[in-house]
Image (cartoon, grey):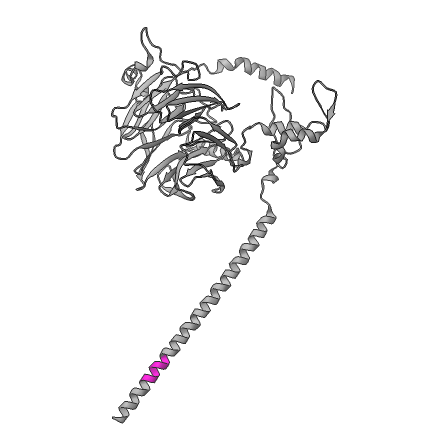
């Protein structure tokens, strides 16, 4: 690394804290006052007109309960009612994109890689619609799905079916990557870890399992509660996991060593939980939502930061989600949808290359092309996402390895036993002497593109087999048609003979008379 590059890096490190001066503001209580006593109407009175419009309520009776999903940019909102109502709109400007009724039950809704496509899990099949509400695809490989999730960097749509199958479908090619049975009862929640793209599922027996499309068995099985797990949420850094159960308990787990950090007891049974970009935890139970500010502290779950109660008791909450880059919490319930203001929940600084709330049509097209070019292969999903540079560093070591504190030497074969999980990566990595792994910089690894190409010989063999099968089927079909035609001709000849015999008999009788 050159001296100029080191100087530039050190300069940017010094100036980094001065680049983004915008910080999220929280509610500051007065003397003898607590923040959870402040209502939404009081907050709206002290806001400007544009911010006050973010608090609204959609009254949609007889169509719920509603499932909701915000797009990654935080601009578009997707609603799906159990009775078949589906709607897409820009919730800031209140412009309706599309609205229709599928005339069957809707179990889950999920945005895909762009705000122009979304998936809806209906009664039998999973359908993909565009922003105008026209049906693009009918995914018959995903049958009776009731939970959906999406991995944006891998273009994988994860689904859990009523038959106990867990599926990963590549939406860029339409191929089903993997599909296998979980051998467990119906799961209660389906989430993913944004750090390593591992799918996390919660089950009625209190077990949390972590899945990868490259393994048919779960990578991790963790007994989190003694009763049914209601919901799971993982922070954006992939370090902490929060679980809730029907025994009114909530637990915070360290995902790095799978140990419990904290446990608390809630006043009621929680139904759904959500985590914001600034690590504010929202817990919903019945028609009440409590938001906690410091959930990882000792007394963080004792008093809530904010509280909101829905107007009617029949409005049982079915889904909650924080809006990205906005201080807003979306609540889907039995009677519609409610948008609530939660000061300090959203990230004030957004990355336009990652998620741009103000992108135009041309920017959206360019972003879609770049996302497809930067697509990560599903074979690289692992519990430790840093295994590739570790493997490359290990391969560049000499054949003899010294043990610390001893002058003895061991062979390379004995060291290979400690790196068994990296053996399958030999066909992916390329022998590069230029790869450097330092504390300051990790250079990107070059992949061998030919290793990702399918084997042509296998393709040719399959093509020949299919061609021979089609030829045989065509021959059989022609033979059966010929036999049927011959049988019909024989029947016609018999009928003609019978008619001729009858006519001859009638003519003889007339002559006698």
Place of residue 16 in the rendered image (x, y in percent of width and height, measured from the top left): 51, 15
Where is 70 relative to 121, above or below?
above
| Left or right, residue 205 beside residue 49 | right
Quadrant where the C terminus sits is bottom left
Label count reads 0
Q: Which residue is drawn at 30% across and 14% down?
A: 37
The answer to whether any part of residue 296 appears in the image is yes
Q: Nearer the viewer, residue 47 or 495?
A: 495
Residue closer to the observer: 287 or 438:
287
Horizontal side of 381 relative to 56 (left or right) equals: right
Residue 321 can be seen in this image: no
Question: Residue 308, image x and y in percent?
Answer: 30, 20
Residue drawn where x is 63% and y is 17% of the image: 4
Residue found 45% across the figure and 70% down from its top: 483
Q: Position of residue 207 (x, y in %)?
A: 45, 30
Q: Is residue 360 above or below residue 462?
A: above
Magenta: predominant secondary structure element? helix
Q: Which residue is the extreme one toward the top?
A: 31
Q: Is residue 114 left or right of residue 423?
A: left
| Residue span colored magenta | 496-502
Q: Which residue lies furthest to the bottom in this view?
A: 512
Quadrant containing the N terminus is top right
Quarter of the image for residue 245 reads: top left
**Residue 501 within the segment the image draws in magenta:** yes
326 with respect to 237 (left or right)? left
294 drawn magenta: no
Where residue 357 sits: x, y (%)?
A: 41, 26
């Amino acid at each position: 690394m050159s001296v100029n590059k080191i100087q530039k890096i050190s300069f940017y490190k010094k100036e980094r804290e001065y680049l983004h001066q915008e910080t999220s503001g929280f509610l500051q209580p007065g003397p003898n006052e607590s923040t959870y006593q402040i209502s939404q109407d009081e907050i709206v009175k002290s806001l400007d007109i544009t911010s006050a419009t973010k608090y609204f309520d959609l009254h949609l009776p007889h169509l719920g309960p509603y499932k909701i999903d915000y797009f990654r940019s935080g601009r578009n909102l997707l609603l799906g009612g159990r009775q078949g109502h589906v709607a897409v709109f820009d919730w800031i400007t209140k412009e309706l994109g599309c609205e229709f009724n599928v005339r069957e039950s809707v179990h889950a809704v999920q945005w895909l890689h762009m705000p122009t496509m979304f998936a809806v899990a209906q009664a039998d099949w999973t359908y993909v619609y565009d922003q105008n509400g026209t049906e693009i695809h009918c995914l018959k490989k995903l049958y009776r799905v009731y939970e959906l999730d999406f991995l944006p960097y891998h273009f994988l749509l994860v689904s859990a079916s009523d038959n106990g199958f867990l599926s990963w479908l590549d939406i860029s090619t339409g191929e089903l990557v993997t599909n296998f049975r979980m051998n467990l009862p119906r799961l209660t929640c389906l989430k993913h870890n944004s750090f390593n793209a591992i799918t996390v599922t919660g089950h009625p027996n209190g077990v949390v399992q972590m899945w990868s499309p490259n393994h048919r068995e779960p990578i991790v099985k963790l007994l989190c509660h003694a009763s049914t797990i209601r919901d799971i949420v993982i922070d954006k850094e992939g370090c902490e996991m929060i679980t809730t159960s029907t025994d009114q308990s909530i637990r915070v787990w360290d995902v790095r060593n799978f140990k419990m950090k904290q446990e608390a007891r809630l006043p009621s049974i929680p139904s759904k939980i959500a985590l914001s970009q600034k690590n504010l935890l929202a817990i919903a139970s019945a028609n009440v939502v409590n938001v906690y500010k410091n959930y990882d502290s000792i007394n963080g779950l004792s008093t809530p930061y904010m509280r909101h109660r829905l107007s009617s008791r029949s409005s049982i909450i079915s889904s909650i989600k924080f809006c990205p880059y906005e201080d807003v919490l979306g609540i889907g319930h039995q009677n519609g949808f409610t948008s609530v203001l939660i000061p300090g929940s959203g990230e004030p600084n957004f990355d336009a290359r990652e998620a741009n709330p103000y992108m135009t049509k041309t920017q959206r097209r360019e972003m879609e092309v770049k996302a497809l070019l930067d697509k990560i292969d599903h074979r690289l999903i692992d519990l430790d996402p840093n295994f590739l540079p570790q493997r490359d560093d290990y391969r560049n070591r000499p054949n003899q390895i010294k043990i610390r504190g001893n002058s003895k030497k061991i062979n390379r074969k004995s060291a290979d036993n400690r790196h068994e999980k990296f053996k399958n990566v030999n066909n992916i990595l390329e022998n590069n002497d230029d790869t450097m792994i330092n504390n300051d910089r990790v250079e990107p690894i070059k992949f061998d593109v030919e290793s990702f190409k399918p084997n042509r010989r296998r393709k040719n063999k399959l093509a020949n087999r299919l061609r021979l099968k089609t030829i045989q089927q065509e021959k059989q079909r022609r033979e059966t048609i010929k036999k049927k035609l011959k049988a019909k001709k024989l029947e016609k000849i018999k009928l003609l003979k019978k008619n001729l015999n009858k006519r001859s008999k009638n003519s003889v009788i007339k002559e006698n008379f």
